[in-house]
Amino acid sequence: MNVNGSAYRTIWLKPGDESVVQVINQVKLPHVFEINDLRTVEDVCRAIRNMTVRGAGLIGASAAYGMYLASLEAPETGFHDALRSAGDALKATRPTATNLAWAVRRMLDAIGTGHSHPDRRANARREAIAIADEDADHCRRIGGHAMPIIAAISQRKPGKVLNILTHCNAGWLAFVDVGSATAPIYAAHDAGIPVHVWVDETRPRNQGASLTAWELGQHGVPHTLIADNAGGHLMQHGLVDMVITGADRVTRNGDVANKIGTYLKALAAHDNRIPMYVALPSSTFDFELRDGVNNIPIEERDADEVRYMTGQSERGSIESVRICPHGTPARNWGFDVTPARLITQLICERGLCDATEGGILSLFPEKR
């Protein structure tokens, strides 16, 4: 992804000092573009918890790099215990997205094959980079697999703009590069298909307004920011041709956990016969679960995220303001679950499939 004409990923090893992991501070966007240094596994845990890094694919890659940093810190005696402890700390940061635990398991397996201390550290570095590279590659493949869908819908309305609605940020910033839900959008835009994106603001942290709108603007994709509750109105009036979201966990039978509010978008799309697609890399599947509503752990975050909003004042300063009466009780669930029956298809790096156990296993026969 380009930022002011320069290519960036969301996470990388610092040039000249590979004991440091560098990330884009997403809390400061869109007003300030800032790169932070992460030097310890505790730094990575903090960055995940406070959402300096966020999004399913990126927190998976961050966990991988966190395990790499842990391998640099761990003593030779008790090395594996130290790595398991680091993995537990990383997994505890955010419970809903399955990519995080998946990355920790994969790192422990790779590190465990080393026969010496230097070997284990080299394995950790190699595997963390591989996880990041695969994340970016899988997102590019998602864009390629979705292109025929977008082209077909566009052909049904020749000469007109294709309107896509997305919720939260499942873009380049939520992954290492390209993004899941935005990968088809970027691919279509780059291929000359006229697309326009309705960007949900995505309360309470406003990742749509702060992040999706920013990165679409950086890529030159036409877009319009809307209030979260405007989507149903737009669908009723024929102003949405398709909905694409990302996912933080998808069960074996196709239930999808994603940013709170996704379920309502899926209901509105279903009522208006608008296709609803969910884009995800294979690391987001949880093949151990079948009942998303009852079994996917839903993170509840600090209630102050609901009580306060942060933005840039007319003076240019970044400020937080309370939007409710003092002492108002609030609750802040981060995700909801969209039942598989409301999803048209899933899009992953292996292709498209129905949101059913049979459909998913047609792409992942090794999970039967």
Image: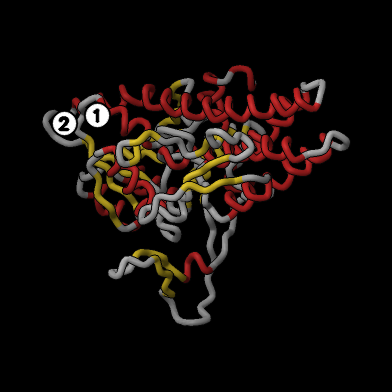
Q: Quadrant of the N terminus?
A: top left
Q: Is residue 159 rendered to the left or right of residue 173? A: left
SS at mark 2?
Answer: loop
Q: Position of residue 361 (x, y in %)?
A: 56, 22
Q: Nearer the viewer, residue 274 or 72?
A: 72
Q: Nearer the viewer, residue 99 or 107?
A: 107
Residue plotted at (77% across, 38% down): 83
The residue sitting at 53% across, 81% down in the picture is 327
Is 329 situated left or right of 152 in this image? right
Residue 140: where, in percent of width, then height?
41, 25
Q: Position of residue 6 (x, y in %)?
A: 35, 36
Q: Which mark is residue 153?
A: 1
Q: Look at the numbered disc 1 and give the secondary structure of its residue.
A: helix
Q: Residue at x 33, y 48 (%)?
A: 214
The number of discs equals 2
Residue appearing at x 32%, y 48% in the figure: 213
Q: Position of residue 92 (x, y in %)?
A: 69, 49
- Label 1 Cα crowd, 10 Å radius (few <14 / some 14-19 / many 20+): some
Toward the viewer: 43 or 142?
43
Quick check: marks 1 and 2 in contact, CB under 8 Å? yes
Whether residue 113 sits left or right of residue 208 in the image: it is: right
Query: Does 33 appear above or below 19?
Result: below
Query: Where residue 157 is drawn, which disc sits there?
Result: 2
Q: Residue 220 — which label?
A: none
- Quarter assignment of residue 115: top right
Cα gap from disc 1 to disc 2, whole angstroms: 7 Å
Identify the amino acid type marked 2: Lys
